[in-house]
Image (tube, rainbow, N blue to C red):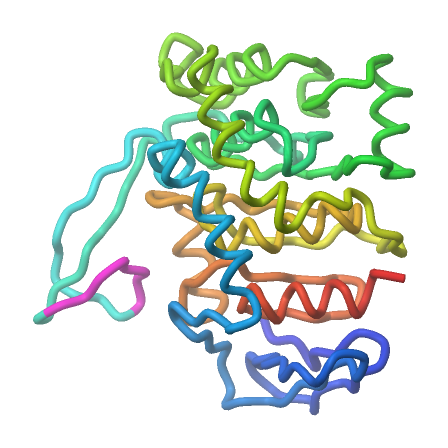
Amino acid sequence: FAPAALPLASGGRALARTPGLALLRVQVKPEGEGFSGKLVGDTYQAQRFYVRSDRIMELVAASFPFLFRAGFGALTNGWSIRIEKDDASKYAFARFGGYMTVEDSKISQFARPSLPVQLYEFEGCPFCRKVREAVAILDLDVEFKPCPMNGPTYRPEAMLKGGKRQFPYLVDPNTNTAMYESDAIINYLFDTYGPGAADVSWFLKGPIAIITAGLALVPSNIITLAGGYKTSELPAEPLTVWGYEASPFSKVVRETMVELEIPHIWKSCARGSPKRQQLFEMTKTFQVPFLEDPNTGTKMFESAEIVDYLRATYQK
């Protein structure tokens, strides 16, 4: 993994060629002036727990689902933790006194889809939220096709494929399965890519799940999602985002991608996910969200800067 350059979106400039990993650090300019990037060192770096002042309210609103949903979507199935001697080549949630935490799960015991499962959904929908939590628990890669209110692309496409104006709508190219109904989708995912539907928590299905998921989304619906679809230019290829459902920083990026109807491959990496080690090896750190845009070659951390990049590149 050694990109030659990390170009910015239109209005920016390409970064200098580098033989190793490169960092795209976005510096936000006053509104209307776009942004520019600069190379910092020879590895990707990220600011841990960094919150930009103009994004505080969005992040506060995005934190409500974690509280109302009791952290669902933060841990993979069978998550466990232990202490071992420190190994700098391995991802660890914490390091101390020559030791490190090692997190594990049962994910390696489950079948993995060869192709990403496709989901037509949107952020402000509590039924969709439940399915995304199941995706995190099962550590699945999903191709999201965002369907914001009045979206001109994927809402009509879902209607054409499934015949209903209803979300979420799942299409699994691995098994030629297509289905509506969040509880049925969750059962299917657990049966096909997990320990079985009998292992689905009562907090993931049923009326309590819908009520708590609905209440959790109210702040974000008021602050960031009230406008629905924002006119955008569709990318030629889906973007890739590393994140997980319980992360408020990942959520604000997803909200923007839904508003702009940007298709994206979601590399779910909740606690216990093997993909945490993959991202650690690729970037020499672990932090989410992490964006990869194959259309421009851009790779970047930091939710606020990712949102700025998406709007500058794809919003009309």
**Residue 289 position within the rendered picture, expressed as x and y whole percent measured from the top left:** 53, 58
Residue 239 lies in the magenta-colored region = no
Q: In this view, does 202 lie above or below 95?
A: above
Q: In which quarter of the image is the N terminus?
A: bottom right
Residue 94 lies in the magenta-colored region = yes
Q: Is residue 278 above or below residue 154?
A: below
Is 56 positioned to the left or the right of 2 in the image?
A: left
Residue drawn 86% across the image and 19% down it:
161
Is 302 positioned to the left or the right of 155 in the image?
A: left
**241 or 128: nearer the viewer:** 128
Q: Which residue ends up furthest to the left in the rendered image?
A: 97
**Residue 305 position within the rendered picture, expressed as x and y whole percent measured from the top left:** 61, 71
Q: Which residue ends up furthest to the front in the rendered image?
A: 222
**15 or 157: nearer the viewer:** 157
Q: Is the magenta stretch mostly helix, strand or loop?
A: loop
**294 or 10: nearer the viewer:** 10
Residue drawn 29% across the image and 30% down it:
78
**Residue 139 position within the rendered picture, expressed as x and y whole percent measured from the top left:** 47, 36
Q: Quadrant of the C terminus?
A: bottom right
Give, as a single range, the part of the protein colored magenta: 89-96
Residue drawn 44% across the image and 48% down it:
63
In the rendered image, which quarter is residue 20 located in?
A: bottom right
**Residue 188 position within the rendered picture, expressed as x and y whole percent measured from the top left:** 55, 14
Residue drawn 55% across the image and 31% down it:
129
Q: How many marks?
A: 0
